Image (cartoon, rainbow, N blue to C red):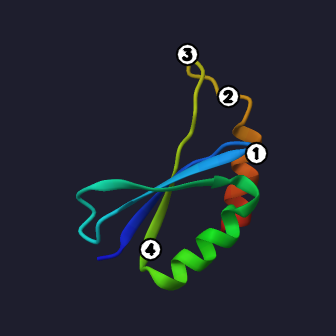
Amino acid sequence: MACLVGIDFGLKRTGLSCTDPNQLIASGLTNLTTSELLDFLQNYCQEQEVEAFVIGQPLQKEGNASAIEVQIQQFIKELE
């Protein structure tokens, strides 16, 4: 099995976590400026076997999409 990488996307900084290869335990990986994110993930995927990315979707209290949703969707397209 490969690990899962969790992404807590932010406009300025983004937090990353990863699971163990059995996908049982997630641990913090790093926190970096968002402008460095795609390069970091590309390098990380060359060194580690990654099965999937899990990207947080922040919602308002009412369940509506937050203001950052547009940027998250743009990031997902770039990541693909």
* Image depth: mark 4 or mark 3 in front: 4
Give the mark, 4 or 1, whose residue is nearer the N terminus: 4
Residue at the image position 32 percent from the left and 54 percent from the top:
26
How many marks do you count on the picture? 4
Q: Mark 1 points at which residue?
A: 71
Disc assigned to residue 66: 2
Helix, strand or loop at label 3? It is loop
Helix, strand or loop at label 1? It is helix
Real-space Cα separation, disc 2 to disc 1, in angstroms: 10 Å
Q: Given the current orientation, which residue lies at the most extreme top position?
A: 62
Q: Quadrant of residue 21?
A: bottom left
Q: Are marks 4 and 3 in contact (CB under 8 Å)?
A: no
Q: How many neighbours does mark 1 have within 10 angstroms: few (below 14), some (14-19), or many (20 or more)? A: few
Real-space Cα separation, disc 3 to disc 2, in angstroms: 9 Å
Helix, strand or loop at label 2? It is loop
Q: Mark 3 points at which residue?
A: 61
Q: How many neighbours does mark 3 have within 10 angstroms: few (below 14), some (14-19), or many (20 or more)? A: few
Q: Name the residue under label 4.
A: 50
Residue at the image position 57 percent from the left and 15 percent from the top:
62
